[in-house]
Image: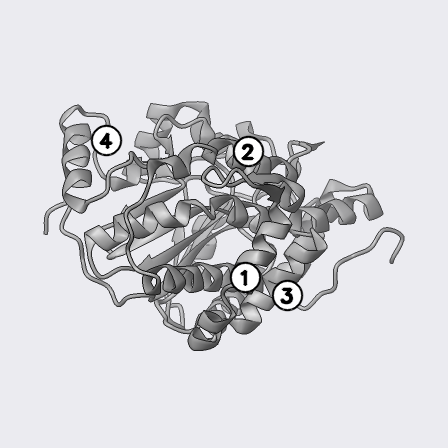
Amino acid sequence: MSDMDFSQSQSLSFGVELELQCLNTREYDLTTTAQELLRLLQDLPCPGEIKPEITQSMIEVNSAVYLRHDALLANLIAIRDVMVEKAQLLNVRIAGGGTHAFQMWSDRRIFEGERYEMLSNKYGYLAKQFTVFGQHIHIGCTSGDEAIWLLHRMSYYVPAFIALSAASPFYQNQDTLFSSSRLTSINAFPLSGTIPFVQTWQAFSEYYYRMKDLGIISSMKDFYWDIRPKPEYGTIELRICDTPLTVQKAAALAALAQTLALSMLENGQRPIDEGIYLAYRYNRFNAARYGLSGEFIDAVTGRKQELGEMICQTIDGLWDFARELGTTSALQLLYQSALNRRNDADRLRAIYLETRSFSDVTRRSAEIWEDGSLEDPRPGDR
């Protein structure tokens, strides 16, 4: 199989990847125990995979591939429970969230492996600063042309996914004033941002091989775009979400992407105007900075509104598709978050307001990860 042979997938099949924090149980700083934990998890008793990430304080969870939200959620819960159980044997706890509140990038260690060492040599300190934690969502496509078309259409909703998933308000003992400070770490890489405006798989393949011939890339992994095609999986990969605090939120975000994809495909593959990217970077910044209260501009109509309002209106147009797919409960969860203008970044800030301790923020994050039913903490509630 060549680099650019597109493996046909079942349309609307989906799965997720989650990058997670490994915490010690003293001050709840990151700990370099990923390798030991991975050894304990090498025989995972449920579908999915757990893998290393670029530094030894991170692990990556890959779900199995599903068509239904309830099956994906059950898979993530099963993986989470096994992972939490094994981590306890090492006196380690696991947490979601897009950044660790007070870790120092200079303390991180690169995970052993040829690719990780190459990235460290190539990008210098950026490799250690890349100890940030994201959720990637894969949506199955039937052809490369469909993948390119769906990727461009989905880009309109990138700010919505950023705002809904935002969970990284703190970095190195500081409130960054961002909902998602994680995205600023990704922005530093030269091949971040958006795919070129190509509209066929053939055109994209020509671009890819030209970049490879120039020595700029060696594989698709070298593109850190917000959404990229994954020909070996037959998917598009949405990469801009922070890792949520719960697997329930992670499954809900994947369900939203699946439902949006169904609505787009059923409305027909109309030609796409490059103007959809005119306000892209502005909307992306506002979502990362202000979350669900950020301004969103529709570059085609010129309409301005808060992202929370835009998300509620979007979901209101998806209920019929949600009933068809079985994603209604997932969309209800996200709808309520958008309506209340409250995401995981707000939840973390509320914990800090209550405790005035970044160690308590990470400790509570671990508790929330272990028990997704925990209620939001409120200032003054003990």
**Mark toward the start of the polypeptide (2 vs 1):** 2
Which residue in the structure is indicated by mark 1? 315
Query: Residue 289: in sight, yes or no?
Result: yes
Identity of the amino acid at label 4? Ile
Mark toward the viewer: 2 or 4: 2
Instruction: Classify mark 2: helix, strand or loop.
Output: helix
Disc 1/disc 3 C-alpha distance (Å) = 23 Å
Residue type, mark 3 in image: Gly
Sort mark 3 into few (<14), some (14-19) or many (20+) by Cα contacts within 10 Å: some
The mark nearer the N terminus, 1 or 3, is: 1
Q: Amino acid at mark 1?
A: Ile
Q: Nearer the viewer, residue 325 or 30?
A: 325
Residue 100 drawn above or below residue 69 = above
Query: Label 2: which residue?
Result: 285
Q: Are marks 2 and 4 in contact (CB under 8 Å)?
A: no
State the image quarter where residue 333 is shown. bottom right
Residue 110 relative to residue 30: left or right? left
Q: CA distance from mark 2 to mark 1?
A: 22 Å
> Horizontal and vertical percent for residue 326?
47, 76
Q: Are marks 2 and 1 in contact (CB under 8 Å)?
A: no
Q: Where in the figure is residue 236, as x and y percent of width and height? A: 32, 52
Residues at marks 3 and 4, CA–CA distance in whole angstroms:
39 Å
